[in-house]
Image (cartoon, coloured by chain):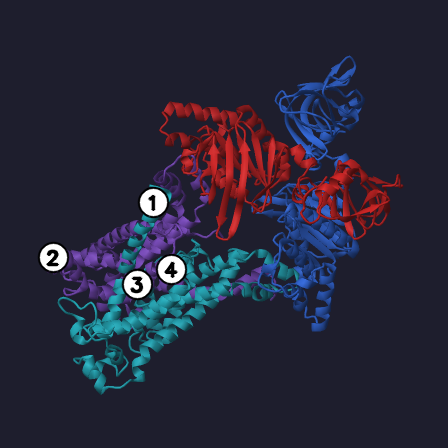
Chain colours: A cyan, B purple, C blue, D red
Amino acid sequence: MNRRAIGILRNLFRYVALVFVSLLALFPIYWMFSTSIKLANEWVATPSVWFPSKPVLLNYQFIFSMSYEYLIGRVPEEAAAFYPFSWASMKPIFDSLILSTSSTLIALFAGTLSAYVLSRYGRKGAPPPTFPLMYRMFPPVMVIIPVVIMYATLRLTDTYLGIIILYSTLTVPLVLWLMKSFFDEIPREIDEAAILDGCSLFGAFYRGVLPLIKAGLAVTGLFIFMLDWSDFMGVLLLGGRNVVTIPLKLAEYTSGHGELYGPMAAMGVIAVIPPLIFGILIQKYLVRGFTFGAVKA
Amino acid sequence: MDFNNPKTFSRLFGLPMNALLYFLGVFPIVLLIYVSFTDWYPIGQQYFWDSHFIGARNFIDFLRDPLFGMSVLRTVIVVVVAITLEFVFGLILALLFVDRFPGKAIFVSIAVLPMMSVPAVTGYIFRMLFLYAGPVNDVLSAIAGTRVSVGWLTTGWLALVSVILMDVWQWTPLMFLILLSGLLALPQDPINAAYILGASKWQTFRHVMLPMMKTVMLIAVVIRTMEAIKLFDGVFLMTHGGPGYSTQTVSLYLYEIGFKYVRFGYTAAMAITVLLVLALFTRYVAIRPLRPKV
Amino acid sequence: MVKVTLQGLTKTFGEKPVISDLSLQVNDKEFFCILGYPGAGKTTLLRLIAGLEKQDKGDVYLGDRLVNDVHPGDRDVAMIFQNLALYPNRTVFDNMAFPLKVRKMGRTDLKNRVQEVAKTLKIEHLLDRTIVNLSGGERQRVAIGRALVRRPQVFLVDEPLSNLDALLRLEMRAELKRLQRELGQTFIYATPDQLEAMSMGDRIVALKEGQPQQVDVPEALYNSPRNRFVASLVGSPAMNFMEGSCKQADRRMMLDVGPFKIDITRFQETVERAAGSELILGIRPEHVRVSRGRGRNSTCEVVVYVVEPLGGEMILHLGVDAQLIKALAPPGFEAKYGDRIWIEFDPDKIYLFDKKTQEAIL
Amino acid sequence: MGLRIENLRREFGELVAVKDLNLTVETGEFVSLLGPSGCGKSTTLNMIAGLLHPTSGRIFIDDVLVNELSPRDRRVGLVFQNYAVFNYMTVYDNLAFGLKLRKTPKNEIDKQVKEVADFLRIADVLKKRAGGLRLDQLQRIAIGRSMVVKPSLFLLDEPLSNLDPALRAVMRVELKKMQKELKQTVMYVTHDQLEAMTMCERVAVMNKGELQQYDTPTVIYHHPKNRFVANFIGSPSMNFLDCSLVEKDGKALLDAGAFTLDITHLHEIVRAQATGTELVMGVRPEDIEIMNQPSGADSVPTSVYLVEQLGAKSLVSMSLGNTIIKALTPGGFRADVGETKWIRYQRDKIHIIDKKTGKVAV
């Protein structure tokens, strides 16, 4: 057998394997999506329904109509007819957006400044470098338990401010390491040239380095947004009434009152869309993000 | 103040992050240590200063608590099995992607989709997949030829398997991506040198590529171990720790004691202990390959 | 347009002293080269002068002004970095205008100044291009241009040519030298390449482990190196060194280096005054004469290992016992691997070093 | 025959990296593949080693067609530019790697590794991990690793480019010595013309994927085939002056604007070789004589532009019309910038090149 034939055979094997892997990766997501457009009688059936017989948007209408408490015991088919779209039902989406965006900005601001100092001036002045890293490594429950205790005393529980502070603090170590890895890629001489040209230390950062690092900032921002958006435990323990994000709403559907698989799936689809888009956008940097900048792809 | 003094400048720039970390880092930990020595029960005693100091009772109690021991054991099982599977699958997948071939970018994007999903949503998805009448049983039926009805979420050990499968589905992509970066970053010359010296593909992989990947593999495993220990969201939505206690991990157990039974003092003692163990693990094992060269 | 004076400059990184107690003076309008191997402290020295690094001890004067506590931006020095430190995605104009913008110069003045500098450097036509689209030589010019627009008092240059290919390097070398002449400004230039230092420098400091070994004009470094280090650093091909010991015989003083002896009677006084009997003989390859047959003054027989033709002349690598000697053979000399030939030293051109202190005796 | 290459060609998409290359290397010969980066030399090397498949053409090693053989079956040794030593193994394991793969008995491996280590003078570091060693030691390991498997052809890919100049000179000699002692067939790839010219018996100059000239260093230096070779070989490089051929009073004159040169004696050859009257005169810096006074009809007045002291030599740049001519004179040459000096070409050393085709006529 010559080289070419072996090459073709190898490729064939590779593609078969890859298609199989792709099916495994996509199927659960497909299942959620297809459930979200199924009618109630197809949500759970034996054998289960792989392709919705009649795709409908009722489940989406359901979650965007009046709030859930009024709908207990009803199925989307009838609910849609009675209850029109309501702004109140959009609250989880707005809450998720507000919390994720503002926490991301705060973490980005604080973390970037520290990352610059760490990259250029070493340890002096910057936070002790391993401390924030450890902070990131502990299971959130354990980090949050003392925070719950503290918030209860400070009356920060179930407030936007409290949760934004929590999110910012949990993600700022990642910003620190990620941005440091980006700063480290900019030669030190860029700052020094700016300083010799007459810039102050701040000027060297702001006019010299920052413009070169816009892409890194964007990547880090999107990555942190994904993490904040995905949080569940934080709001579970510190939110609830006043603050309700999408994952929390999702959990609400599962607890108790019969399984509303269709609306849950619709909520799930809405929850995963932003991270999927952002994730694909910054795919090249995901490794760097998850490994604290230690592995660069 | 002279902002052109590097020391002043870096203090100033470090200020916002330090503020965040001290506010939610140092302060709560001190509080946690205090509370762990009290019997604080917020329903009866509104503020922690209303509670009574009871010494090390909480620590002695939870060490005797069989549920806690079991949750630790379960966490260890989940972590070890899931990480092993993820590592093996991730490495195989990475090897499939080393060469260049048409469509590579698309396949990579598809393969890494699971890790971008929101963990809570993943938990919910797998809850649907593993229903009695779910598609997993459908596939098994199709293979077996007769109707198979496995109670994935209602049988204790199968629920644990389901949890592991969920973690494997969501996080194999990360392992794959890290290992792939490692493989692609390998210098080509030593590999070619090995070929020319007479090594076969397998020998080159075994004697040249694997040793050079050591650091990256270590990083991948450490990172994933840390993340797997955190496991909470997915399990919470998928099984709620059930049936019974069969999928209750440390995180879930702490949650239950702390927030269902609101025994804050007791929870604080457990949290402190786990934190300490993890801190030692992080300090002496995990941080080494990760520590950026400052 | 100013002289630079360094007094007792000391800098340590951690435990390691990088510059230790260094004093020297760079004259006004001088092209001053810092020559040394990588790690000798050349870059650190430049950075200390620029103020990017703070010395542990010692003083830096620019002209008569003590600048120890002056912010780098206010020292009025420009530095051209080894990696040039240009902004890759901005245009040449923006790069060159940056220092002027920082100093808040008016738009028209700024434009004129940049134009004028671009003209001297022959990069006017590139002003609108971005840096990433330029060749290595062009980037080099832009980096020089960015330093020039400010009209600083002192130029610090850190091996900027090391990333260029050989031909371009030769060209830029001449260009830089011409520029310095025309501007009449003080240049301090760090390089590991002795050829570069020898050809460009008005004076050179040979630096070793943060300590100046010799500060002098190029010819002096070549003709009368202060110690063995300088002798080996300057000149290509490098000087031959052979260890030997002095022996008295028949009122003559002979230096025995193993394969042969050499008569050093006429330096006897100097040698006895300076050192013990353990010496190092140094001889430049260009002062080793080779011949096919044994001549009257021939010192010893050697084996040809490698012949390097260098245009007309050639370098012969010769083996005798376990030692290697390089010799520069005249054009037309025929030799190939394994030949046995004779060598002869010009007795006026030898150098002697004390083996213990490595200092030059002769 | 150590190596024979027939019509070797390699394309990367549109780009032809190697264009119909023909080359033979005798057994035991030391041959260099020389050219600027991107000339196709590394591609050629990789094809010989089997890391890259040729688009067309045939490669024979020891008269065996190896096109379809995998690298491991070709019996070639390859030393990479960055050595590609297995950092994580001990030096011993590095050297033994090839033998272990061949399932050589343990005591045999031991014997051979020791032998090679002694030969390369790395016996003292055998037990150390390769990662922390010096560059020259890494290089010895890389060479030794290939040596133990006794390849019929040794390929060296710019092995000296990572070493500092002093070490490079030493390794050059050692490599040459080794090759001679082992009578090993070696193909040495480099972009450094000095290395190629000094070490190799024959040099193949490549440019843009095409072989320009393949001959001994002496021939290449004195009789370059075309302008590229003339320019690439020799440092400082050859001067080129545009000129045209004028016939007057039965004499053939080379008119370069600033001066004319009588080339009647070469007229016939030039007329036969050149396509037109537009010519380029090439002359090496060392073939130009600088004089204070005009002497003879060939003297041309020039003004000194720059003098660079290189130690044993001085490199003088002079402006002639609007071109710069470089001349190499004995060291210590002194002249002020702008001073008038006369130059004279050594008439038998000039090259006349067809401007259009770049071919050297004389």
**What numbered label is drawn on residue A247?**
none
Q: In whole angstroms, how far apart are the C-alphas of marks 1 and 3?
A: 53 Å
* Subunit bearing disc 1: A
**What numbered label is drawn on residue A136?**
4
Q: Answer yes or no: are tags 2 and 1 on the same subunit.
A: no
Which is more toward the observer, B282 or C95? C95
Q: Answer yes or no: are tags 3 and 2 on the same subunit.
A: no
Q: Of helix, strand and loop, which one carries label 1?
A: helix
First in residue order: circle 4 vs circle 1: 1
> Are discs 2 and 4 less than 8 Å apart at CB?
no
User: Which circle, 3 or 2, is nearer the viewer?
Assistant: 2
Residue A66 relative to residue D113: left or right: left
> Are discs 2 and 1 less than 8 Å apart at CB?
no
Q: Of helix, strand and loop, which one carries label 2?
A: loop
The amino acid type of the residue labelled 1 equals Ile
The amino acid type of the residue labelled 2 equals Gly
Residue bearing the label numbered 3: A141
On-image quarter of the C terminus of chain C: top right
Residue count near mark 2 (Cα–Cα under 10 Å), binned few <14, some 14–19, many ≥20: few
Residue B172 relative to residue A196: left or right: left
Residue bearing the label numbered 1: A6
